[in-house]
Image (tube, helix red, strand yellow):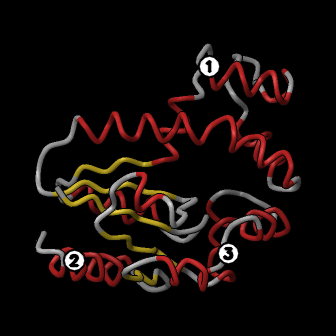
């Protein structure tokens, strides 16, 4: 089975590509969805995050207040490292468990924080990066997610650059045009992989 990683920073369009792949019948595992699952109230990661950051990172229902935690970690590299230590291993194990349940010619893993070691960790056969210029990404984050421009820039600044991603991947999907253009590029890459 081909296991294809979908990389890309915040605001680039990984979710749009993932949704398109799912609409075509492909199995897609989204690391962000997995992160939400492993931090549900009462889970070991939830307890570790509460212990590390205090009850202030919980909302009134006792769930992780992801927006508040993001506000903390995207302005504090030490806090971000602490968050990553608590969650990354658990997310990786859950992704592996979900991969085991998939049959068919291919599965896709959307990895917003893709690093070179993910190729081996998830046995990726190829990696595609969904990219947009920082200006386009900031525009999407302010328009679609309601972030301030400074928050959007801070979040982009905490992630690797487009150039760094391009050096690590096999193919690039530029997402600065229409949805039709984006889908056509994904179709082209599926065809190249023998998956059309």
Residue shown at the point (52%, 46%) measured from the top left? 32
Mark 1–mark 2 Cα distance, whole angstroms, equals 40 Å
Tell me: 80 left or right of 178.
right
Q: Which residue is mark 2?
A: 187
At label 1, counting other C-alpha atoms closer than 10 Å, the crowd grade (few under 14, some 14-19, many 20 or more) is: some
Determine the image quadrant of residue 61. Answer: top right
In the picture of the structure, the residue carrying the numbered disc 1 is: 44
Which residue is located at x 40 percent, y 81 percent?
173
**Frontmost residue, 43 versus 184:** 43
Q: Is residue 25 above or below residue 69?
A: below
**Quadrant in which the C terminus is drawn:** bottom left
The x, y position of residue 11, in whole percent, is 59, 67
The Cα atoms of the two marked residues, 3 and 1, are separated by 36 Å
Q: Secondary structure at mark 3?
A: helix
Whichever of labels 3 and 1 marks the residue nearer the N terminus, that label is 1
Can you give x and y, in whole percent of width and height, for residue 37 in the image? 50, 30
Q: Residues within 10 Å of mark 2 (few under 14, many from 20)?
A: some
Spot occupied by residue 151 in the image (x, y as percentages of width and height): 81, 62
Image location of residue 72, percent across then percent down:
85, 46
Of circles 1 and 2, the one toward us is 1
- Residue at the location (37% across, 76% down)? 179
**Residue 137 sits in which quadrant?**
bottom right
* Label 2: which secondary element: helix
Between tags 3 and 1, which lies in front?
1
Return the mark for residue 178.
none
Q: Which residue is mark 3?
A: 139
- Of the numbered discs 1 and 2, the one sitting upstream in the chain is 1
Q: Relative to 71, is 51 above or below?
A: above
Q: Is residue 67 left or right of residue 121?
A: right
Looking at the figure, which quarter contains the N terminus? bottom left
Front residue (pair 116, 48): 116
Instruction: Name the front one of labels 3 and 2.
Output: 2
């Amino acid at each position: 089975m081909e296991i294809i990683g979908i990389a890309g920073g915040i605001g680039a369009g990984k979710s749009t590509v993932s949704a398109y792949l799912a609409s075509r019948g492909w199995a897609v595992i989204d690391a962000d969805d997995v992160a939400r699952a492993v931090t549900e109230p009462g889970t070991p990661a939830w307890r570790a995050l509460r212990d590390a950051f205090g009850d202030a990172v919980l909302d009134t229902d006792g769930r992780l207040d992801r927006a508040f935690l993001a506000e903390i970690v995207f302005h504090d590299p030490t806090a971000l490292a602490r968050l990553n230590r608590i969650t990354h291993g658990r997310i990786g194990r859950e992704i592996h468990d979900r991969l085991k349940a998939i049959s068919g010619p291919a599965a896709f893993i959307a990895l917003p924080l893709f690093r070179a070691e993910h190729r081996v960790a998830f046995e990726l056969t190829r990696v595609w990066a969904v990219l947009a210029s920082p200006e386009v990404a900031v525009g999407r984050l302010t328009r679609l997610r309601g972030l301030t421009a400074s928050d959007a820039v801070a979040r982009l600044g905490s992630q690797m650059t487009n150039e760094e991603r391009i050096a690590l991947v096999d193919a690039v999907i530029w997402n600065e045009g229409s949805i039709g253009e984006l889908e056509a590029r994904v179709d082209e890459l599926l065809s190249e992989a023998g998956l059309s």
